[in-house]
Amino acid sequence: MLLLALGSLAVRNISEIPQSDFGRGGLSHITIAGAVLHGMKEVEIWLQTFAPGSRTPIHRHSCEEVFVVLKGKGTLMLASSSHKYPGTPQVFQLYSNSTFSIHVNDPHQVLNTDEYEDLQMLVVISRPPVKVFIYEDWSMPHTAARLKFPYYWDQECLHEPKDEL
Amino acid sequence: MLLLALGSLAVRNISEIPQSDFGRGGLSHITIAGAVLHGMKEVEIWLQTFAPGSRTPIHRHSCEEVFVVLKGKGTLMLASSSHKYPGTPQVFQLYSNSTFSIHVNDPHQVLNTDEYEDLQMLVVISRPPVKVFIYEDWSMPHTAARLKFPYYWDQECLHEPKDEL
Ligand SMILES: [Zn+2]
Ligand SMILES: [Zn+2]
């Protein structure tokens, strides 16, 4: 029993954790420590790499999120949750060895705006697994944003096995 | 008001965040995103570098903790909270690009056991600011572990200014 419990805590090699784009072109996502995969209850950590030109959707989630930029350059678009819709976002430049935090429910988007270089980031969220509300554009009302849950990287582990008919 | 609120979210250069050993020889600690410094409520992230031979105390805390090893080699000593005292810890080897998670209240210690190289890690905790219970050794009862709060890196910001008499 004790050995089994400790087994889930063992040191893991990040290079051996499977990565996938989960259907989003230009993305490489690795869950370093997650709710669905590793039983985390309060924090979750991802390693994400965005190819030039790729981006997250415009989205919000009711958790804190912190980004640590390991490599590359990019852009953060950040709006507020205090009006009926996000509105014109503030624009911030991202660079290697920079960090930024997203407050609970603030709509945001992260883009690799560089022409050549990958953008690699460690992403930390609270309250896993993440529940993402997606906006089509910055003028969509908060109430119209579409819930995507489970999110792509939590889906494969949560879905029921299908019967082969 | 909106601009002020967004100011606290601005992108920060990690190289420009002050580091200190906070009185612990061989440590370099940087709070990348913290409760006391940056108003985080659910997660906190540190960048810590341990010189050869340096270590954390044996300790526990009632939060989740995830380590991502960026550079170097080290050792994790990990015990359980299910007996009266930690007892002989399990020993795990740490290496660059490895990760491990500490469950709530499990006593643990991280050591740079390499002779030459620094051990550098990103550390993520939930429920900030951290409340640390320190053990003198692995046979000290959990109830005797001494609470250190605020912890060293939160102390400078929390303490009251002293009157000069
Ligand atoms: Zn997000
Ligand atoms: Zn700890």
Image (spheres, coloured by chain):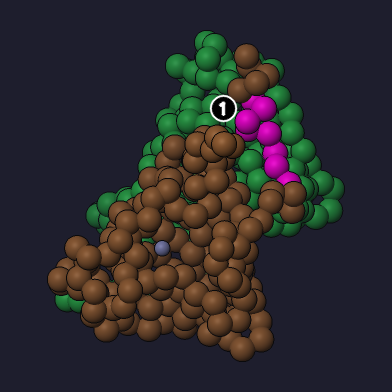
Chain colours: A brown, B green
- Residue A40 coordinates in the image, percent (x, y): 50, 38
For the point 39% across and 50% down, which residue is it? A149
Q: How many marks on residues?
A: 1
Chain letter of the residue beneath label 1 in the structure image: B
Numbered range of the magenta stretch: A6-14
> Looking at the image, which is closer to me, A22 or A104?
A22
A7 falls in the magenta region = yes
Report the residue that reaches farthest toward the bottom.
A115
Q: Work out whether A4 lies above or below B131.
A: above
How packed mark 1 is, by other alpha carbons closer than 10 Å (few <14, some 14-19, many 20 or more), is many
Can residue A22 be seen from the camera position used here? yes
Q: Secondary structure at mark 1?
A: loop
Classify residue A142 as left or right of residue A21. Answer: left
Depth check: give the residue in front, B154 or B15. Answer: B15
Report the residue at 69% width, 51% height from top: A18
Rendering coords of residue A13 (x, y %): 73, 47
Residue at the extreme front:
A165
Quarter residue A142 falls in: bottom left
Residue type at mark 1 is Pro
Residue at 66% x, 86% y is: A116
The answer to whether residue B130 of the structure is visible from this angle is no
Residue B127 lies in what quarter of the image? top left
For the view shown, which residue lies furthest in the right direction? B115
Q: Residue B122, image x and y in percent?
A: 59, 54
The front one of B55 and A14 is A14
What residue sits right under mark 1 in the picture? B107
Q: Is residue A36 left or right of residue A1?
A: left
Is residue A123 positioned above or below A93 on the image? above
| The C terminus of chain A - image quarter | top right
